[in-house]
Amino acid sequence: MFETVGPQLIVNIELKSISSRANGLEPAVANVIQRHNAGQQVIVSSFNPFALRRFRSAAPDIPLGYLVSPDEPLYLRQDWLLAGVRYQARHPEDVMLMRGIWQRPNGAAIVSMSGRWTTLSGLSNSRHSA
């Protein structure tokens, strides 16, 4: 897939995991990305802060995105379980931006799930073009 899209596009890889326990998903995904030398072509995202924490340990240089839904508890919406984990983007649902209940974190971009609200200033301009 990386060869098909080429380096012009950033691929958002979502880790689908609901567990707080490791099951091997994160290192396996990191291995595929590294095997294809695609670390500059991806952002890895998840609703699960534990999955993001495990992925960060497996691949410290690959950008992360934290997916957020208004239906989640406050401690998930406010990323309390990601304390100390560097991530490059938050992906709130549009309704969270429109209601004014989302605040931009320092240094992290905000990218809505529908793509209608996009701020990528927290990511390198050399990797993203408008």
Image: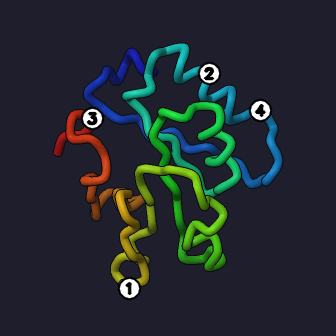
Question: How many C-alpha atoms fall within 10 Å of the one at disc 3: few (<14), some, or many (≥20)?
Answer: few
Q: Residue furthest left?
A: 130
Instruction: Give the amino acid type for the residue marked by disc 4 in the picture.
Output: Gly
Give me the C-alpha separation between circle 2 and circle 4.
Answer: 11 Å
Indicate which disc residue 86 carries: none
Residue 28, image quadrant: top right
Circles 1 and 2: CB atoms closer than 8 Å: no
Q: Please report the residue visible at 48 percent of the width from the left and 50 percent of the height from the top.
A: 87
Find numbered disc 2 in the image and state the secondary structure of the residue it sits on: helix
Circles 3 and 2: CB atoms closer than 8 Å: no
State which quarter of the image contains the N terminus.
top left
Mark 1 vs mark 4: give the one in front. Answer: 4
Mark 1 vs mark 3: give the one in front. Answer: 3
36 left or right, relative to 48: left
Q: Please report the residue visible at 32 percent of the width from the left and 57 percent of the height from the top.
A: 115
Find numbered disc 3 in the image and state the secondary structure of the residue it sits on: loop
Which residue, given by chain and number where applicable, does mark 3 sit on? 127
Give me the C-alpha separation between circle 3 and circle 2.
Answer: 21 Å
Instruction: Give the amino acid type for the residue marked by disc 3 in the picture.
Output: Arg
Q: Which callout, 1 or 4, points at the residue further toward the start of the chain? A: 4
Q: Which callout, 2 or 4, points at the residue further toward the start of the chain? A: 4
Residue 103: give x, y in percent of width and height. 39, 76
Mark 1 vs mark 2: give the one in front. Answer: 2
Which residue, given by chain and number where applicable, does mark 1 sit on? 99
Indicate which disc residue 31 carries: 2
Q: Which callout, 3 or 2, points at the residue further toward the start of the chain? A: 2
Instruction: Give the amino acid type for the residue marked by disc 2 in the picture.
Output: Asn
Q: Which callout, 3 or 4, points at the residue further toward the start of the chain? A: 4
Give me the C-alpha separation between circle 3 and circle 4.
Answer: 28 Å
Circles 2 and 4: CB atoms closer than 8 Å: no
Which residue, given by chain and number where applicable, does mark 4 sit on? 24
